[in-house]
Image (tube, grey):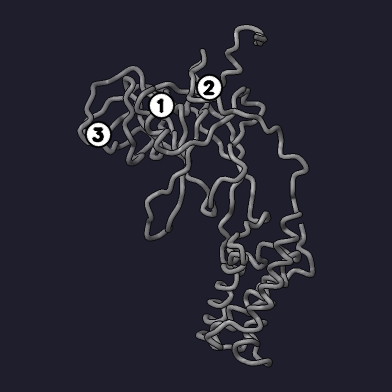
Amino acid sequence: MAESTLSLALADLRTAIAEMVYGGNATYATLTAAEQTRVDSVLKSGLRQFYHPPPDPSGRTHEWTFLTTTTTLSLLAAYTTGTIASTSGVVTLTGGTFPTWAASGMLRVSGIDYSINTRDSGTQVTLDDLTYTVAALATYEVHQDDYDLPDAFGFLVDSPPTYAMTDSVGYEVQVVGENRIRAMRQQSSIGGKPSLVAVRSINKATASGTRQEIMFYPRVTEAATLTYRYRARPDALGASDTYPWGASDHSETILASCLAAAERLVEEARGIYWDDFQRQLAASIAFDSRANRPERMGYNGDNSDDSGFSVDLWGAVLPYDYRNYLTGPVTHKVN
């Protein structure tokens, strides 16, 4: 799909900032390396300011609809082929091959889960618990219940996730707190297609920064496909990504934001470019508020009597709904 020819691209924004900071005849290509770095720094500041606009006079902030995207997540079936033995946390497999994702999963033996630290080879994994030793066993299970979310993932939008029709799931997935998932894992050992999900941050790593993962309950033992929507965290523009999010619909607002950032750098104060950005931002917010707006929000029911969770005959954890357990017609008595 071709981008609109009215959209401002990386080169256009660099040129506008260079002219603002270094004079009307300046071009990005003729600047020194240090000056180009300065222009790119202003560009990043302007984009961050646009993607996360300042609050309006009433204190409300706007979430851009075009920063919401839809994707899928493939849940992996548990692996149980072959037999295992373990010595000091080193588990060897006979008659099978550990899946490539084993290092992200759990080894389940006799109803107890052990986290896997590394997949050393197709027939060996090392657990975090280096004291675990067991003679050859006939049964085991490797399953993955926590999955890394995309690098650009911000937060879930229009939750909860939904299963594909081919997964034949008759219940709605519920988004809960991660403490709820941990509590359920502590109390129960059932497996299947999950009915509860939670999102939590992964500990910050120097090389990758802050990332998030999604947790599931019950434990994932069957393959399935989940679709979900999330707010994206945009990257900086570069050689392989030359157009900012927002396309031509918001190009003037993006330009105004970048020039306001340049003005703040040069003048060390807000001025006419900041005022222009505020006017353009108001117009963009008004336009975006109309874009992709649903005509109906759906049925507005009163679920105040719903509470807790129940387990069906197949082991699925479902939100308890009193309407599913009525044994006969409801009658009213007139006094």
- Specify whether 4 is left or right of 154: right
Indicate which label's residue lies in the foreground, 2 or 3.
2
**Looking at the picture, which amino acid does disc 1 mark?**
Gly
- Quadrant (top left, top right, bottom left, bottom right) of the C terminus: top right
Q: Which residue is mark 3?
A: 89
Q: Which residue is mark 2?
A: 320
- Specify whether 322 is left or right of 212: right
Q: Earlier in the sequence, mark 1 or mark 3?
A: 3
Residue most toward the top? 328
**Looking at the picture, which amino acid does disc 3 mark?**
Gly
- Vertical placement of 101 versus 80: above or below? below
Q: Which residue is mark 1?
A: 96
- Quadrant (top left, top right, bottom left, bottom right) of the N terminus: bottom right
Camera-nearest residue between 118 and 66 = 66
Q: Is residue 11 visible?
A: no
Q: Earlier in the sequence, mark 2 or mark 1?
A: 1
Q: Quadrant of residue 136?
A: top left
Residue drawn at point x = 64 percent, y = 87 percent: 20
What is the count of numbered marks? 3
For the residues marked 2 and 3, what is the alpha-carbon distance in whole angstroms?
40 Å
